[in-house]
Amino acid sequence: MMGNATTELLQADETGMTRAAQLLRQGTLVAFGTETVYGLGADATNAEAVAAIFAAKGRPRFNPLICHYPTVEEAVAHVVADERARMVARTFWPGPLTLVLRRNSHCPVALLAGAGLDTLAVRVPRHPVALALLRLAGMPIAAPSANRSGRVSPTSAAHVLDGLEGRIAAVLDSGPCPIGVESTVLDLSGPEPVLLRPGGVTLEALQACLGPVQPAASSAVVQGLRSPGMLDSHYAPTLPVRLGASSVAPEEALLAFGPPLSGAGRVFQLSAAGDATEAAVKLFEGLRRLDREPGAIGIAVMPIPDVGLGRAVNDRLRRAAAPRGVQG
Ligand code: TXA
Ligand code: MG
């Protein structure tokens, strides 16, 4: 599904959902909305379909994919889930949390989906359209965010088409994503819970449920070994990104959080009230919009407190601002 093939835009009605499920069963790629971002889905048990995801995104093969399921029972059936993992799953699923657990011996998911690791990332999303599609498809769906590798994640069907039109079979349009940043990735494959990626479930909520949660090692190299997708440069717009701005140059675009800095010409407001949850919803749209501002030479970003969903927003912004050499 590459080159100049046409990409079907499907509505989230019975006809569109049936078509999307049929395309997935045929082994082709279908992007679909979740509560976090749009995912690029394929039959996780079909190695060729999974390989097509890596090709369409231009994603390095060492970066493993998340497997999506319609129920907690189906998700835990493919991994080694102890009482701690089941408790976390029951608390946060369906929802914006991904659990990394060891694959079990009868796991039918293609090894390529997990990039050959002995662990598998599993998640039960809570968006009703995603859940209905997963039920209709009748198999686990491997789905990374539906963007070209290293670029900004999509939170609408139009964003998906911007990057992948002509490279995938279809997009199922379920409207804008209500959370706007990806799921939290929590590694429960070892004795200590490790936060691999901050996301839609806050660290505070995880700690209230689990007790202490280790942050992933801060070095990109060490982190890369544990979770190969956590490479530094990611979510990158074309323009350079400057964080923690306390002033703005006339030729810069401003990503504002609260009252905009004086002198700003081109402004995208993440949250006038300074609310991190609202900022998460608007983050990727804001980066895409400012990236298209005529004449802008860079994006300046106002500081956002590093608590609650602010952690996920700051994580994505740090990656958007990172040197562009390495891409996930
Ligand atoms: O919200 C989300 O999580 C979205 C929606 C579509 O579900 N998906 C998503 O997928 O963000 P992706 O591929 O863009 O990010 C998945 C992250 C990557 O950083 C990857 O390295 C990590 O999860 N990951 C996947 N499997 C892993 C594993 N077995 N061990 C460690 N990290 C893993
Ligand atoms: Mg991604």
Image: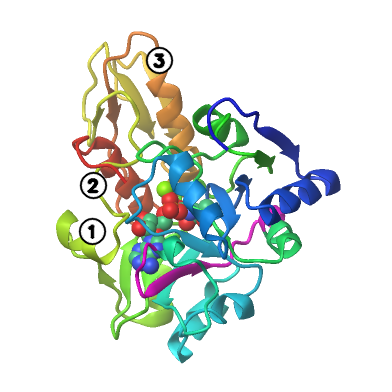
Image quarter hosting the N terminus? top right
Residue 203 seen from this side: no
Q: Give the CA distance from mark 1 to mark 3.
A: 33 Å
Q: Is residue 299 above or below residue 187?
A: above
Mark toward the viewer: 2 or 3: 2
Q: Position of residue 270 (x, y in %)?
A: 44, 35
Q: Is mark 3 within 8 Å of ligand 2?
A: no
Q: Position of residue 116 (x, y in %)?
A: 36, 67
Mark toward the viewer: 1 or 2: 1
Q: Which mark is residue 232?
A: 2
191 or 109: nearer the viewer: 109
Tell me which segment is drawn in magenta: 115-130
Q: At 35% from the left edge and 13% from the top edge, which residue is drawn? A: 265
Type of the residue with mark 2 = Asp
Q: Is mark 2 within 8 Å of ligand 1?
A: no
Q: Circle 3 sits on which residue?
A: 293
Type of the residue with mark 1 = Gly
Q: Which mark is residue 224?
A: 1
Chain-order first, disc 1 or disc 2: 1
315 or 234: nearer the viewer: 234
> Is residue 126 rendered magenta in the image?
yes
Chain-order first, disc 2 or disc 3: 2
Q: At 48% from the left edge and 32% from the top edge, which residue is drawn? A: 285
Q: Please tell me in which quadrant of the rendered image residue 237 appears.
A: top left
Q: Position of residue 35 (x, y in %)?
A: 58, 53
CB under 8 Å between discs 1 and 3: no
